[in-house]
């Protein structure tokens, strides 16, 4: 149970940092950040593998890069629908 909570915290922090780097946020606040962290970690690990330190089950560097990619793609898609 503790490892799941720790994963949620680390995923949220990764999503939050990625949002700060690209100066954009996903809708949903904390939940959006957690989802960006989890999906970004999956995407980044699939592309870059297990690179860098691991915290809470996430390899930090690929997770951060994946979350940045995810936020940029989602922001682009949302901007298309707003027109």
Image (cartoon, rainbow, N blue to C red):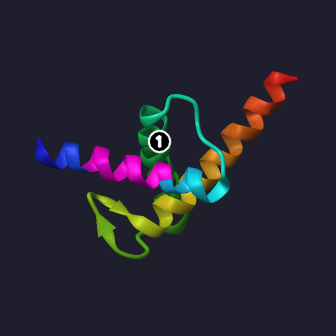
**In this picture, is 71 found above or below 51?**
above
User: Magenta segment range?
Assistant: 7-16
Q: Where is residue 55 in the image (x, y as percent from the top left)?
A: 29, 64
**Residue 19 appears left or right of 31:** right
Report if residue 15 lies within the magenta region.
yes
**In this picture, is 58 found above or below 16?**
below
Q: Quadrant of the N terminus?
A: top left
Q: Quadrant of the C terminus?
A: top right
* Residue named by callout 1: 33
Most prominent secondary structure in the magenta stretch? Answer: helix
Q: Position of residue 43 (x, y in %)?
A: 52, 52
Residue in front for this viewpoint, 29 or 73:
29
**Residue 1 appears left or right of 19:** left
**Residue 43 appears left or right of 78:** left
Residue lying at 57% horizontally and 50% vertically, measured from the top left: 19
Residue lying at 38% horizontally and 49% vertically, measured from the top left: 11
Residue 50, quarter of the rendered image? bottom left
Q: Which residue lies furthest to the top in this view?
A: 82
> Helix, strand or loop at disc 1?
helix
Report if residue 69 lies within the magenta region.
no
Residue lying at 42% horizontally and 46% vertically, measured from the top left: 38
Q: Which residue lies furthest to the right in this view?
A: 83
């Amino acid at each position: 149970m503790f490892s799941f909570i720790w994963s949620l915290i680390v995923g949220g922090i990764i999503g939050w940092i990625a949002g700060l780097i690209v100066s954009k946020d996903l809708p949903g606040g904390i939940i959006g950040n957690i989802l960006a962290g989890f999906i970004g970690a999956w995407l980044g690990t699939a592309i870059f593998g297990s690179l860098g330190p691991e915290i809470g089950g996430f390899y930090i560097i690929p997770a951060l890069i994946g979350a940045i990619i995810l936020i940029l793609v989602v922001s682009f898609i949302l901007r298309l629908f707003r027109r």
